[in-house]
Image (cartoon, rainbow, N blue to C red):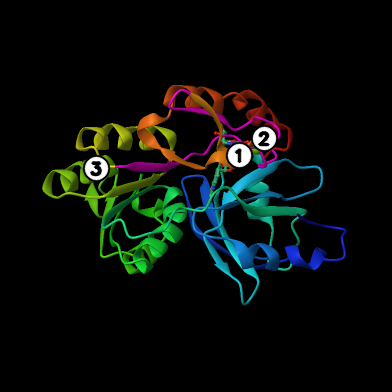
Amino acid sequence: MVKKGSNVEKFMKIIDKEFLMESQGTRIVKLTILVPDIAAKAKAGQFVVLMVKEEGERIPLTVVKADPVKGTVMLIAQEAGFTTKLLAQMNAGDFLYSVVGPLGHATEIKKYGKVILVGGGVGIAEIYPVAQAFKDAGNEVTAIIGSRTKELLILERELKEASDACVVLTDDGSYGRKGFVTQALQELLEKSKYDLVYAVGPIPMMRAVSLVTKPFGVLTLVSLNAIMVDGTGMCGGCRVSVAGKVKFSCVDGPEFDASQVDWQELLTRNSVYTEQEKHICRLHNAG
Ligand code: FAD
Ligand code: FES
Ligand code: MG
């Protein structure tokens, strides 16, 4: 863990900041952070847990890109509540209070054959490093990316570069095809045989992906966004049930076989702090 106040505190400097989109009361911010130890080790599928300020909470964010030479990692965060809004207010030159990582198991990268990656909303940022790694391993990669509207779509160019084919959808038809990522997924699976589906997005989207792929018997992995506190298996906050067994998403995951996940439990547990989250936003007038 790199912590502010230590003799390596310069390692949590924000080197670069850019808003990827600002629309409909939300923003998605891209931050490049100097954390050489993490940048040297991070692999596709892993995440960090960071604290913006000393008195703040910990939040997990996926390592979207790691540059071991420059010692930087790229994080992409959508403003969801208090802490992500606070993070989006930070600027290049500022320091984060703490960054822990890389955490979680890296995605198993090997030649599966034909792979479909499905990203919804900010989940597009989370499938991007995995798409690149699968492509580099010689897989035929098809990306399906979707957002509610054109303004909310991110990383289209990057996903097109990292895949052999890329289907873009918006819920309202303002860009790409009109519809949901699951429709495009269903069509692809009906036309051809695929060896792996990998999906990241809101829980209802990942659950719907799981329902679509089940009849085709194709292995489907999802990266679960369970609520995490320490990120090291100590607090139990990220407890999920997979194949009827208790798993901790931070140390056993975050990727799991979608067909084995207890989705209803995950939905319920993820909304446990909704009242407190609203309260803290009201207190700080942040949302
Ligand atoms: P709040 O108002 O506190 O919460 C909004 C919602 O976010 C909650 O209802 C809950 O569902 C979820 N949430 C809140 N606190 C946590 C927490 N500590 N851990 C997990 N979920 C929480 N988001 C991104 O925008 N980009 C990413 O790359 C990304 N990667 C993630 C990787 C992992 C492994 C996990 C578990 C989550 C990831 N998330 C990512 C989700 C991100 O952590 C939450 O959006 C963030 O914690 C919300 O905090 P908040 O205080 O801004 O919002
Ligand atoms: Fe505490 Fe996983 S975040 S056990
Ligand atoms: Mg919060």
Residue in view at x 55 percent, y 37 percent: 249
* Residue 183 percent coordinates (x, y): 22, 41
- The image shows residue 212 at horizontal and vertical percentages of 25, 35
Q: CA distance from mark 1 to mark 3?
A: 27 Å
Q: At 71% from the left edge and 54% from the top edge, which residue is drawn?
A: 99
Given contact means CB atoms under 8 Å apart, are the residues at marks 2 and 1 in contact? yes
Q: Secondary structure at mark 2?
A: helix
Mark 1 Cβ inside 8 Å of ligand 1: yes
State the residue position of label 3: 179
Quadrant for residue 256, please give it: top left
Residue at screen point 36% across, 37% down:
205
Q: Amino acid at mark 2?
A: Cys
Q: Are marks 3 and 2 in contact (CB under 8 Å)?
A: no
Residue 117 included in the magenta stretch of the image: no
Q: CA distance from mark 3 to mark 2?
A: 32 Å
Give the side of residue 255 with respect to residue 218, left or right: right
Specify the quarter for ligand 3. Answer: top right
Which residue, given by chain and number where applicable, does mark 2 sit on? 281
Residue 275 in view (yes/no): yes
Residue 10: % across, % down: 79, 68
Q: Which span is picked out in magenta?
A: 219-244
State which mark lies toward you, 3 or 2: 3
Q: Is residue 35 visible?
A: no
Cα separation between marks 2 and 1 = 7 Å
Q: Quadrant of the C terminus?
A: top right
Task: Quadrant for residue 180, please give it.
Answer: top left
Label the magenta part by its dominant secondary structure: loop
Residue at the far bottom in the pictured view: 69
**What residue do we see at 63% from left, 23% from top?**
275
